[in-house]
């Protein structure tokens, strides 16, 4: 009897409860993976080609992601050669993301609301899909994004610089958080922020820069030739295709400008796209820059942690909202950013907003399932307009409360 009571007292401790919940979540997600049994190794065609031909990434072959976003998957495939190791790695990164998110939310809102919102994010369909299906950097990049935001809220310039740099070396979009952080910090803190960011990037990039600097640098620059996709700008330009169709292998084995010289841009090839209306590209970029700078400047006037958190999230959200590039994985950072920007909204309304986002994401993902009854053009039109209206509604409610 005494042993049972002692055990119950231990179980009731918040830390133990959290560990048990995370463990249960992991068991459910991994069980789902085992039931579905997806052959995710088929998506490692780059890794198979590089390993079988004894090539070196960023020297002989340019992958689509920076080192931290690519090499862990290559390592797991080379050492273990199975899908389970990749899913476990994704699951670990998802766990870390949820833990940091919960800690962040608990520091600015009630424990009850933090639990509700973290649970909703954990059940987000795209996050579950990325954990059990993806061999790309999306779950890893999400961790660095939320960690960087956490350090911005905590006003820790060293933490921001390190996490933003590691995020940039995972997926490029993480670097955008350096702009609001640079505005927020002053004097010596700003020096620490920038120097830590640059130092980590140089140290991590040094091996590849010493072997072939041009090939490595174009890992970050070759995305500039990519076209729009699955966004309002893509639909206006007449592009209704997906971003994930395989690019020609030889593209990754030569410099980006060499590829552009021999492969004529086309309005049907996403990897080397010719815009029908080039002004759309500039409108997209202008809106991104304007709102990113606007919210970053407003951040300098914020004093309270929750204001810093919401304004930082708005700055990052504007980058994604006005991007010409979208696909289901982009919903991962967007979903969390919407969660953070609507913290002042009543819990019930916030849950309804996030539930609507989930439905839109499910429809978006269903468009690309082979044999789907949803027409691609109609589906993308419905999804993009619905998402734009929902984000506008969420931002309107948020700004009204902020007044």
Image (spheres, rainbow, N blue to C red):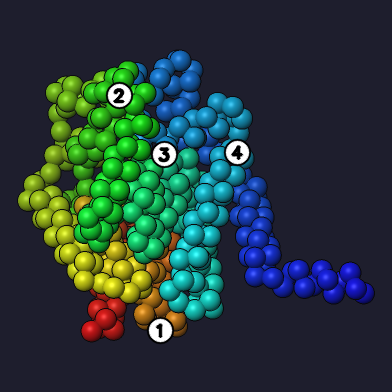
Residue that lies at the very extreme toward the front in this rendered image: 188
User: Between disc 1 and disc 4, whose residue precedes?
Assistant: 4
Mark 3 and mark 2 in contact (Cβ < 8 Å)? no
Q: Which residue is mark 3?
A: 69
Question: For the residue labelled by badge 2, is the local secondary structure a helix, a strand or a loop?
Answer: helix
Query: Image point 39% across, 69% down: which residue?
Result: 339
Q: Position of residue 394 (x, y in %)?
A: 30, 75
Name the front one of labels 2 and 3: 2
Q: Which residue is mark 1?
A: 346
Question: For the residue labelled by badge 3, is the local secondary structure a helix, a strand or a loop?
Answer: helix
Mark 1 and mark 3 in contact (Cβ < 8 Å)? no
Q: Which mark is residue 261?
A: none
Distance from Cα at disc 1 to Cα at disc 4: 40 Å
Query: Image point 63% across, 55% down: which residue?
Result: 26
Q: Which residue is mark 2?
A: 209
Q: Choose top left, top right, bottom left or bottom right for residue 156.
A: bottom left
User: Between disc 1 and disc 2, whose residue precedes?
Assistant: 2
Q: Position of residue 33 (x, y in %)?
A: 61, 49
Mark 2 and mark 1 in contact (Cβ < 8 Å)? no
Say if 268 sits above or below 7 in the image.
above
Name the front one of labels 3 and 4: 3
Name the front one of labels 2 and 4: 2
User: Between disc 2 and disc 3, whose residue precedes?
Assistant: 3
Say if 44 sits above or below 370 in the image.
above
Query: Image point 67% across, 67% down: which residue?
Result: 17
Q: Which residue is mark 4?
A: 85
Q: Is 232 left or right of 113, judged from the image as shown?
A: left
Say if 325 sits above or below 61 in the image.
below
> Dot 4: few (<14), some (14–19), or many (≥20) neighbours within 10 Å?
some
Question: For the residue labelled by badge 1, is the local secondary structure a helix, a strand or a loop?
Answer: loop
User: Between disc 2 and disc 4, whose residue precedes?
Assistant: 4
Answer whether residue 355 is visible to the viewer in this image: no
């Amino acid at each position: 009897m005494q042993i049972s009571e002692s055990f119950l007292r231990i179980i009731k401790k918040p830390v133990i409860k959290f560990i048990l919940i995370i463990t249960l979540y992991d068991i459910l997600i991994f069980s789902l993976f085992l039931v579905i049994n997806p052959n995710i190794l088929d998506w490692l065609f780059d890794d198979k080609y590089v390993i079988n031909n004894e090539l070196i990434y960023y020297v002989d072959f340019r992958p689509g992601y920076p080192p931290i976003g690519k090499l862990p998957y290559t390592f797991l495939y080379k050492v273990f050669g199975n899908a389970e190791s990749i899913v476990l790695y994704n699951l670990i990164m998802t766990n870390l993301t949820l833990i940091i998110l919960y800690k962040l939310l608990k520091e600015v809102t009630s424990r009850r609301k933090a639990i509700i919102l973290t649970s909703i994010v954990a059940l987000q369909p795209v996050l579950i899909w990325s954990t059990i299906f993806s061999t790309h950097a999306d779950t890893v990049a999400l961790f660095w994004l939320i960690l960087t935001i956490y350090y911005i809220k905590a006003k820790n310039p060293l933490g921001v610089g390190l996490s933003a740099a590691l995020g940039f070396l995972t997926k490029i979009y993480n670097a955008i958080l350096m702009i609001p952080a640079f505005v927020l910090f002053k004097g010596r803190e700003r020096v620490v922020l920038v120097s830590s960011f640059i130092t980590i990037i140089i140290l991590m990039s040094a091996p590849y820069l010493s072997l072939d600097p041009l090939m490595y640098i174009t890992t970050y620059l070759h995305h500039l030739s990519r076209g729009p996709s699955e966004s309002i700008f893509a639909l206006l330009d007449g592009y209704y295709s997906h971003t994930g169709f395989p690019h020609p292998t030889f593209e990754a084995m030569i410099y980006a400008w060499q590829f552009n010289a021999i492969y004529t841009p086309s309005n049907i090839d996403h990897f080397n796209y010719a815009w029908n209306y080039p002004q759309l590209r500039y409108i997209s970029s202008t809106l991104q820059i304007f709102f990113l700078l606007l919210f970053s400047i407003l951040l300098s006037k914020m004093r309270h942690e929750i204001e810093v958190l919401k304004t930082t999230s708005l700055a990052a959200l504007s980058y994604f909202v006005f991007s010409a590039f979208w696909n289901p994985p982009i919903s991962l950072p967007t979903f969390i950013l919407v969660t953070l920007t609507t913290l002042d909204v009543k819990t019930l309304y916030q849950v309804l907003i996030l539930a609507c986002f989930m439905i839109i994401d499910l429809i978006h993902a269903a468009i690309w399932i082979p044999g789907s009854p949803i027409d691609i053009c109609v589906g993308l039109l419905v999804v993009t307009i619905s998402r734009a209206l929902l984000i506008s509604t969420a931002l309107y409610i948020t700004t009204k409360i902020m007044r």
